[in-house]
Image (cartoon, rainbow, N blue to C red):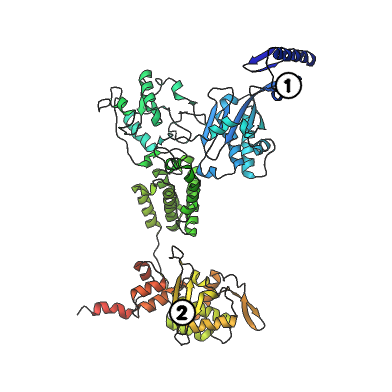
Amino acid sequence: MVLMFLDDGFGCNTNFDNTSVMAADIKEDLLKSGFVPKAEKTFWVPVQNISFLGVEINSAQGFICIPDQSDASSSGYAGYEVNTLNGVSHGIWTGEEISKSSAWRELQAVNRVMSSLVHILENHNVKWFTDNQSVATIVHKGSMKPDLQYIACQIFSFCMRHSISLTVEWIPRKENERADYLSKIKERDDWGISFEILKIISMRWGKLEVDWFASEHNAKLPVFYSKFWNRTCSGVDAFSFKWSDKRGLFVPPISLVNSVFNKMREDKSCGVLIVPHWESAVFWPLLCPDGEMCSGVKDWIYLPTEKNFYSCCKNGSGIFGSHQDDIDKLPEVLTGKVALLPELLQESRATSTATKYNNGFLRWKRWALSNGLGSGDILPAKIFPVALYFASIIQSANSPSPVSTAFYSIQWMHEINGFISPTVSSLVKNVFEAGKRKLSKPIIKKEPVTPDMLCAIYSRLYENGNLKNQRILCAILLSFAGFLRSSELLSIKCSDVKFDIMYMSIFIESSKTDKYRDGAWIVISKTDTILCPVINLHKYIDWGNFADDDYIFCNLSSTSKGFKPRDRNKPMSYSTLRDLFRNALKPHVDNIEKFCLHSLRSGGASAAANTGVKDRLFKRHGRWLSDRAKDGYIKDDLNERLLVSQSLGL
């Protein structure tokens, strides 16, 4: 028997010898007819395993293998079954999935395409072609990496459940061009509606049965049809079905509105068609030929216009998308510079803040996925799920901090990605405010340290040449005189201090309120008293023999001759500083719990305020951005407060 298809063909016979004779006859006939067989694609010696038109035929083992091809790009994945007209599966990666390794994406592509085409592949021998060599190895042998091994196990279990015999084979990328092309398709019109919109139209026109134009991430009904096969759709190519049997929901791509409306007329279907109010669109004259809805439209309403009521394409593009359309319109020379923006946007906040917001958003994502929300509902997020998320945090939190972090994390992530944040909703705002009220506790401010306390500490601890005691004395005096936070104090290096005849200058490289990291110089006057910060710090640096790059407040080692600096290249810990301060102050106060390291900054600020230092100089010295922040540190003198009522003339 000989089978021909265009310029491809193969022959078979009962045994090796008969097949050899037949092959020689065919070759001779072709040459006499003027055809020149291509040597590298022709086998004249009989074999028992051959690939013909993409189908593997194995006469030795007695099976025919239907091949599948797949590919995964940085934007999406795709695969197709070569013998089926509509056997194409396609999907878009989420933002998190894009950051995964190429091996992870290629392996996940196999997993998802196979799940989508199960109705075709079930009970078959499947030959799978991929242009990623790692995939072929991992499917057959597994992987040492847990995330890849997990997907490989999923593929194995799926094949066992559906009686699929899978063989994966690597092919060069040039032989996988169709799958490569399909994987890079970006849906521009894959927009959808929210469940809030579905509720509005269902209450007005009744229950709907099928979502005719949807995708895996935006389907609103259990039965839905997609452009490509995916794991949960009921079919593909909605136009190939009759629409008259079921009440349908129609949210078509804008380019298909005319075709959809005409088919609804032809099939006499009943359903809800959702289109934008776009009077310049090509479909508008069909819907409103004379400025009024045409006879085929029995009823209509205006839907909410806020973007939160709609979903954009999974890749962020389309009529409800973010920046993708703008990016696609850029000249090629500028496209490569787009990669500069994500890192810069991360730096729109301090590193610690950006890290906190990123972690906060990841907590929202984990909660959403664990509670049944799809990846398309995470960014952009919908109003009601976010409100429920805040409510769940409020039930378990002990302070307003977790709720605030969640609120601002979601808000920031939406802003830098070009989406309208659900935090602008009055519902979400009110839940947020309710949480802050419920979880807030009375603020008990710590008492400020006074100059009298400093005198008592100095008198007890000062000892000539004692580096250990001088360290905590200098830390206390500098924090008091410079209004220093503990983080600012611990970051001071010897090179940051400049001594002058009448004062010293200290450079604070970074501060909590220094948004742009310009740094700030503070100046502290020389007072020539026992509490003089300049004199005491000068002694401490001399006794410790500190070099320019040494941290001044580092750990110390005990020796037979006293103490000496240890680990000069890093400062002591916050907890060590706190304990040293508490031990120094404890003998001189009734309740040490009323004091903390901030008591030094507060004490210096209160002393300065009560002696009438100008407000502008006061704020600059303490590096405060607002009067409200500054005033929170000041404890007014009782005599100053009494002046108010004394001046009333009573």
Residue 574 visible here: yes
Name the residue nearer the viewer: 345 or 623: 345
Quadrant position of residue 52 = top right
- Name of the residue lying farthest toward the right: 17
Residue 113 visible here: no
Q: Secondary structure at mark 2?
A: loop
- Of the two numbered discs 2 and 1 on the same chain, state the one appearing first in sequence: 1
- Type of amino acid under label 2: Val
Look at 52% across and 72% down and name the residue there: 492
Tell me the tag on residue 589.
Answer: 2
Q: Which residue is mark 1?
A: 43
Q: Position of residue 65 (x, y in %)?
A: 66, 24
Image quarter hosting the N terminus = top right
Q: Nearer the viewer, mark 2 or mark 1?
A: 1
Q: Position of residue 285 (x, y in %)?
A: 30, 26
Name the residue nearer the viewer: 470 or 439: 470
Look at 42% across and 52% down and name the residue there: 407
- Type of amino acid under label 1: Phe
